[in-house]
């Protein structure tokens, strides 16, 4: 389960979901990923709120565990009174893939932490032999944004990390962030 440490924390950001006749719904999505049962299970709770009103339009809960006998991660996700079980496959980078099939319809999600420390996710649907079509895009960032406003010790506690060194992997200040920080220091000591 330690290979999933990169997910642990609270994330939020913008998402787009295609529905119905091809319309896109703009969301603010949040994810809270925490280990439970002394690291035996990873619990991920996600909520999507529409941008105009902030009303919850999506709410899901997933558990991820490692099946030693099969040598695979298993995910069970719950949403709208339904659930699905699938394999979660780690990628070479900090990320994973998962999906499911329903008759001739297949879905595939690819999630990874990019070089800026942002959680990015793309969902595709595949109908019969047609090429994959994107229906879900998501970019969540948290720690890099929060780092501008607090000390690293408070940040690591809020991120849910047990070690501040874990948090450091997710902080990627831009040149503008560094300049702003230096200006704040200069103003404070002047």
Image (cartoon, rainbow, N blue to C red):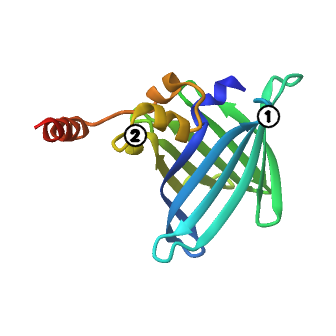
Q: How far from the left and from the top, in percent, is residue 67?
A: 84, 28
Residue that carries the numbered disc 1 in the rendered image: 65
Between 51 and 39, which is closer to the camera in this rendering?
A: 39
Mark 2 lies on a secondary structure that is helix
Q: Is residue 84 above or below residue 43?
A: below
Q: Quadrant of the N terminus?
A: top right
The quadrant where residue 128 appears: bottom right
Q: Residue at x 82, y 62 (%)?
A: 82
Q: How far from the left and from the top, in percent, is residue 23?
A: 51, 73
Left or right? Give the position of 149 relative to 55: left
The quadrant where residue 94 appears: top right
Q: Are the residues tagged 1 and 2 within 8 Å (C-beta)?
A: no
Q: Residue at x 44, y 27 (%)?
A: 168
For marks 1 and 2 on the same chain, the one whose residue lies earlier in the sequence? 1
User: Is residue 163 visible to the viewer in this orientation of the structure?
Assistant: yes
Give the number of the disc on residue 135.
Answer: none
Farthest-out residue, front: 189
User: Is residue 134 visible to the viewer in this orientation of the structure?
Assistant: no
Q: Residue at x 36, y 33 (%)?
A: 172
Q: Quadrant of the C terminus?
A: top left
Q: Is residue 104 above or below residue 23?
A: above
Q: Residue at x 60, y 74 (%)?
A: 20
Mark 1 lies on a secondary structure that is strand
Residue that carries the numbered disc 2 in the rendered image: 144
């Amino acid at each position: 389960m330690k290979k999933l440490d990169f997910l642990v924390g609270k994330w939020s950001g913008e998402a787009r979901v295609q529905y119905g006749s091809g319309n896109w719904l703009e969301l603010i999505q949040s994810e809270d990923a925490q280990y439970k049962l002394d690291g035996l299970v990873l619990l991920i709770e996600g909520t999507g709120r529409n941008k105009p009103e902030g009303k919850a339009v999506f709410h899901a809960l997933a558990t991820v565990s490692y099946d030693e006998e099969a040598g695979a991660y298993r995910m069970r996700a719950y949403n709208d009174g339904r659930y699905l079980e699938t394999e979660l496959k780690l990628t070479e980078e900090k990320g994973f893939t998962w999906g499911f099939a329903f008759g001739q319809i297949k879905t595939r999600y690819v999630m990874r932490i990019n070089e800026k420390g942002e959680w990015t996710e793309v969902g595709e649907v595949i109908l019969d032999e047609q090429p994959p079509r994107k229906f879900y895009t998501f970019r969540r960032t948290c720690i890099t944004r929060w780092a501008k406003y607090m000390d690293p010790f408070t940040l690591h506690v809020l991120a849910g990390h047990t070690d501040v060194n874990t948090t450091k992997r997710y902080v990627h200040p831009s040149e503008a962030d560094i300049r702003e920080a230096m200006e704040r220091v200069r103003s404070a000591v002047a």
